[in-house]
Amino acid sequence: AECAGRLERAEGENAKLVAAREAAVRDKADALRAASASESTADRLRDQVEEMKRLFADQKEQSQANFDKVMAQLRLVEEARERENAEADRHLHEAEARITDFNGQVEAANVRLKEQAEHIRSLNATLKSQRQALVDAESAL
C-alpha cells in the first residue's frame, strides 16, 4: 500500500512534470514564433529604412540637379542682362557723342548767325547812309 501510494504520488508528480514540460515547450515555441515575427518585423523595418535612405539620396541628387539647372539658367540670364546693359551703354555713349557734336554744330551756327546778323546790320547802316547821301544829293540838285 505504501508502494502503491508512492507510485501514485510519483505518477501524479510525473504527470505534473510532463504538463509543465509541455507548457514550457509551448512557451518556447510561442517565444520562437514571437522572436521570428520580431526578426521579420525588424527586417522589414531595416528594408524600409534602407528604402527611405535610397529615396532621400535620390531626392537629394534630384534637388541638386534642379539647383544646378536653376543656377545655370540664372547665369545665362545674368550674362544676357550684362550684354544688354553693355549694348545700352554703347548706344547711350553714341547718342551722347551725337548730341555733343550737334551742340557744337548749333553753337557754330549761332556764331555764324551772329556774324551774319552783324554783317546785315552793317550793310543796313551802309545802305541807310547811302540812301541818305542819295537823298541829300537829290536835294542839292
Image: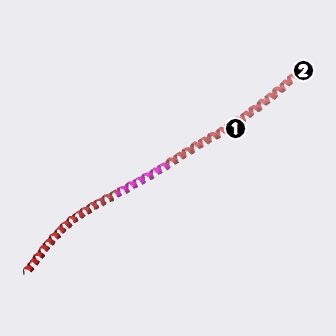
Instruction: Residue at the far right: name it.
Output: 1
Tell me which residue sits at (17%, 67%) in the image. Answer: 118
Tell me which residue sits at (20%, 66%) in the image. Answer: 114
Tell me which residue sits at (16%, 72%) in the image. Answer: 124
For residue 37, which numbered disc appears in the image?
Answer: 1
Coordinates of residue 78 in the picture (x, y in percent): 41, 53
Q: Are marks 2 and 1 in contact (CB under 8 Å)?
A: no
The first of marks 2 and 1 along the sequence is 2
Question: Which residue range is magenta in the image?
Answer: 66-88
Q: Magenta stretch: residue 27 in it?
A: no
Coordinates of residue 23 in the picture (x, y in percent): 79, 30
Coordinates of residue 22 in the picture (x, y in percent): 79, 30
Tag 2: amino acid = Gly
The residue wearing badge 2 is 5
**Vertical relation: 67 (above or below) 110:** above
The front one of 135 and 63 is: 135
Occupied quadrant, residue 117 = bottom left
Tag 1: amino acid = Ala
In terms of secondary structure, where does tag 2 sit? Answer: helix
Q: How many marks?
A: 2
Q: Magenta stretch: residue 77 in it?
A: yes
Coordinates of residue 113 in the picture (x, y in percent): 21, 67
Q: Residues within 10 Å of mark 1 (few under 14, many from 20)?
A: few
**Vertical relation: 86 (above or below) 10:** below
13 vs 120, left or right, is right
Q: CA distance from mark 2 to mark 1?
A: 47 Å
